Amino acid sequence: MIVNPTDEQEFFRETTARFLAERTPVAALRQLRDDSFGFDPQYWREGANLGWTSLLAPVLGGGSLTDDGVVDLTLIAGEFGGHAAPGPLASTNLAAAALNDAESHTGILADLVAGESIVSWCGIWFRQDGGPETSVQLQADGSDIVLNGVASPVEAAEPATHLLVTARGDDGLSQLLVPTDAAGVKKRPLQSVDLTRRFWRVRFENVRISRDALVGGQGQAARAVERQVHLGFIIASAEMVGAMQAAFDMTVEWAFDRYSFGRPLASYQALKHRFADMKSWLEASHAIADAAASATDSGDPDAAELASAAMVFVADYGSELLQECVQMHGGIGLTFEHDLHLFLRRHTLDRGLYGTSAQHRQRLASLAT
Amino acid sequence: MNTHEIEDLDTFRARVQSFIGQHLDHRTRSISLRGGDTDEEQLAGVQHDREMQRSLFDAGLAGICFPREYGGQGLTPAHQAVLNEELVSYDYPAHLQSPSISQCAPVILEFGTEAQKREHLPRILRGDEIWAQFLSEPGGGSDVAGAVTTAVRDGDEWVLNGSKIWTSGAWWSDWALCLARSNWDVPKHRGLTVFMVPIRHAGIELHRIELLSGMNEFCQEFLTDVRIPDDQRIGEVDAGWTVGIRWMFYERLGTSSPYMTMPRNAHHDIGLAARSVARDAGRLDDPVAKDLIGEARALTLVRQQLPKRLEEAITAGAINDQAAAIARLFGGMVATRLNTIAFELAGPAGVTWDEADGATAGIGTDFLIRQVATIAGGTVEMARNVISERVLGMPRERTLDRDVPFREVQRARNGQ
């Protein structure tokens, strides 16, 4: 989280922090364990009113309070991580960014921004070289487009009214807005490491749709997709850091509270040094995640490198930190009853969704020429 | 000083650019841990840096954050940052920065008398005096306050006896700050005093230490009945630890120091250095090599960002200034990893080489001396103590030397 927020940014973050603390306390999260959507539509609408879905959609005249929409979104993402909050924050915002940038389907975008409907971007995976790829094929058929293939994982596919589908045709990548009730769209729920975030595998079987569904030009979506994955890295990094901060704070408290052999854990140098290492990883994670977000807002040419550096570092050292937090807790840290796993889950999910750290290292090697 | 006298950053930047255009060459050399330069070459490098410092001083660009009455510019860390940004890829007076300008001068500024400050600070900032640190001793590295170099008062003078070690560049430096034990009958932190000592002085015998890499910048000094006038004392008698705490704080700041003039991101290309090594080892298309290059790049970028965050957080009061130890720890750990990555990339070319081999040449020697990054300037173990105790507020380590006269503290296995 940024060190020097403006008063507006601090108010914005604080409002969401209070809302999440009230609406999704740990007990509420636990109750959502078996909920098929993992969040309540009313909760999402109220969150949208707090600005969760509008920051990347300035075309509607709303947008961010400041000129730093991406940084502002990371403030929300950080709170999502810190509360292990439910809801498809990244996938809706990435869909909003695509619709906004293409100035396309603004009515649907308006519903998305208002939290009245869910539009989810779906199903990108990463090639070994770290580039984004899709398994959905596009074929033109007269004035229609026909989609075939599988997108997976797709967040909130069931509650969504539309999916933003990235598809590959002979002419390259295209993006389309597909109603989830279109004929041939088959959704199958997946299991997830997260307690509340839900994903589906979506099969497109000869899904026939009009060209009006295109978001941007046919075969012209490569740059948009690259921007969406970039923003995905930024949101995921911020959310992961939020989860790390929550777990670390909880574990430091534990080290002061827990006594063994007549002394608190916090008095053992063998453990203090590990806390010092964790603190350095945590601050470094904040630093790189914030730098990547800020470089994105300012159009800095280093933004792509910073984003992948954040994904490498926050993924690898973040997992190390969270597992160290489990270790510091001992057996209780392995239980469902303890809250620590909520943050371990959130970090683990995010590091898996947006390319492995090995893929991001390949991206960095390609960029560093 | 009135704020309206502060030069605005744009004017300052233009002045810096004009100076660089007229006076500085692109940097072609760097201070290496590999050794290999003759003493004559090293002395020529120091002399070159003194002259560069003098031209910075004459142009009003030395001592940016030092007060004007002591030869500085009375400007802000933001001005220093501008200078450091503009210096990227240019030559700069590297030998004069640490410890002379970034550690010794701030200590003199903070604790020196008016006369001491007026005499020495302008000379340091002009490049006329280079200062070293008589701090560590052969019997104690991290336990700096356990110094046993003794200072005994004799009228208006003090007589110093003992030995100091790890004084980088002392053999080409002029003065040293020296931490000495002035009282053995009080607990260790309460019996220390700091002095300003001319290095070429009767009773000081200086030896060079050769590191395993061949580098011989570090020195050890033997002090025998070195007589120092009382007006060269810094701070109060027996209050040397008050000085020492700040002194080591400036040391831990390292390249984050607002007093340091060095190109921003002087380490920027180290992540790319991995790429150069891979290229010269013929491994640029090897996916394993690319994985290592990517890791090096990520770590380099993170290491660049961390000190900025910490500085902002310290300035904003969100974290106390001991958090500078976080950058010290992280920088050390990243440096050792980058070193290992370069070594892995070099393969056989890193352990046997011809100087003409390119970036792989000498990588094995760098690897041998890898731990310098986590030892020099205060070990990472001490940084971990500082972070856990003074940043996270965890209980201090129990010590056996705290509340007893230092004379009675056990200092070696056999009792001495």
Image (spheres, helix red, strand yellow):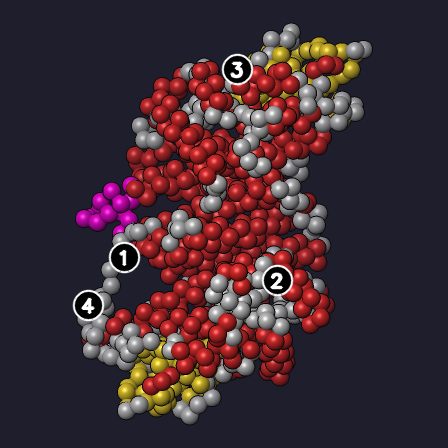
Which of these two is toward me, A191 or A185?
A185
Alpha carbon distance from label 2 to label 1: 45 Å
Which residue in the structure is indicated by mark 4? B403
Alpha carbon distance from label 1 to label 3: 55 Å
Q: Which residues are magenta?
A: A254-268
Left or right: A212 as drawn, with respect to A243: right
Which residue in the structure is indicated by mark 2? B12
* Label pair 1/4, CB-CB below 8 angstroms: no
Judged from the image, the secondary structure of the residue bearing numbered disc 1 is loop
Report crowding for label 1: few under 14, some 14 to 19, many 20 or more residues within 10 A (C-alpha): some
| Amino acid at pointer 1 | Arg
Marks 4 & 2 on one chain? yes
Report crowding for label 4: few under 14, some 14 to 19, many 20 or more residues within 10 A (C-alpha): few
Label whose residue precedes the other's in the sequence (2 or 1): 2
Chain letter of the residue carrying label 4: B
Label whose residue precedes the other's in the sequence (1 or 4): 1
Which residue in the structure is indicated by mark 3? A116
| Residue A358 appears in the picture as rendered | no
Alpha carbon distance from label 3 to label 4: 68 Å
Alpha carbon distance from label 1 to label 4: 14 Å
Left or right: B155 as drawn, with respect to A150: left
Left or right: A330 as drawn, with respect to B62: left
Report crowding for label 3: few under 14, some 14 to 19, many 20 or more residues within 10 A (C-alpha): some
